[in-house]
Image (cartoon, coloured by chain):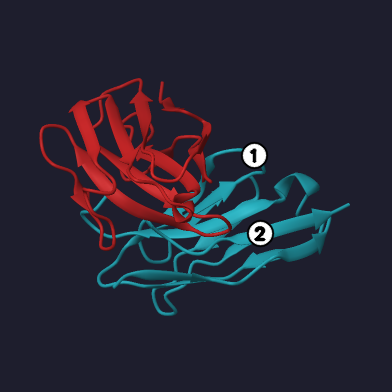
Amino acid sequence: SAVISQKPSRDICQRGTSLTIQCQVDSQVTMMFWYRQQPGQSLTLIATANQGSEATYESGFVIDKFPISRPNLTFSTLTVSNMSPEDSSIYLCSVEFPSIGANVLTFGAGSRLTVL
Amino acid sequence: GDSVTQMEGPVTLSEEAFLTINCTYTATGYPSLFWYVQYPGEGLQLLLKATKADDKGSNKGFEATYRKETTSFHLEKGSVQVSDSAVYFCALQKRGRRALTFGSGTRLQVQP
């Protein structure tokens, strides 16, 4: 099967705190992608997480703000650090499942963060 | 850099009307093109894709043709239903890269 599970599905956070989002898949995948969808906006790629190496960040995103872990081929975490209201978004995990097809990304349901 | 431009929404149609959502792209080389759909309260789902020029992707009555000469990938459906109400995202994927670049999304509202 091809299942992506994200936790938490939603959370309300206080300014200045950090939150870690988990992404679990049910089969081994090479790359995992983290996207952000700000309210009413499109999806923007934050970083690509590869197992055994540091994540690759897109322009405008830095490791200190969005540290990522990828301890194995089925799991990744994204931390949103020192949050401000501007970080209120839906954060999505995405992977390419070999069973679904090459070059097709499947998305998790997302983690909706509200920062007060 | 690579980019995807979609027509602004919301697009409001009556049931059984014809739908077109315009999508154009800017990219070097020949990317793959996708339409994703986000139904209310749900996650993003792949609707259709095309990987080379003149390919037509189709699914659930929706179609889109990869037009290299106009760098376009317009989404069409001959007769929309209320259940098609959603946000539609056009996206491109460069050769050799897995990550997607998304357009801004177009909200479709279909009225009975």
- Label 2, secondary structure: give it: strand
Q: Which chain is cyan?
A: B
Residue that lies at the very extreme toward the bottom in this rendered image: B70
Q: Is A31 or B29 nearer to us in this picture?
A: A31
Name which residue lies at 89% across and 52% down. B112
Q: Is B112 or A13 nearer to us in this picture?
A: A13
Name which residue lies at 51% across and 64% down. B104
Q: Which residue is mark 2?
A: B107
Residue A34: name its quadrant: top left
Q: Is residue A55 visible?
A: yes
Q: Which chain is red?
A: A
Mark drawn on residue B63: none
| Mark pair 2, 1: CA separation | 14 Å
Q: Position of residue B58 (x, y in %)?
A: 55, 51
Mark drawn on residue B41: 1
Q: Is residue B71 above or below residue B59?
A: below
Amino acid at circle 2: Arg
Q: Is residue A107 above or below residue B108?
A: above
Q: Is residue B99 visible?
A: no
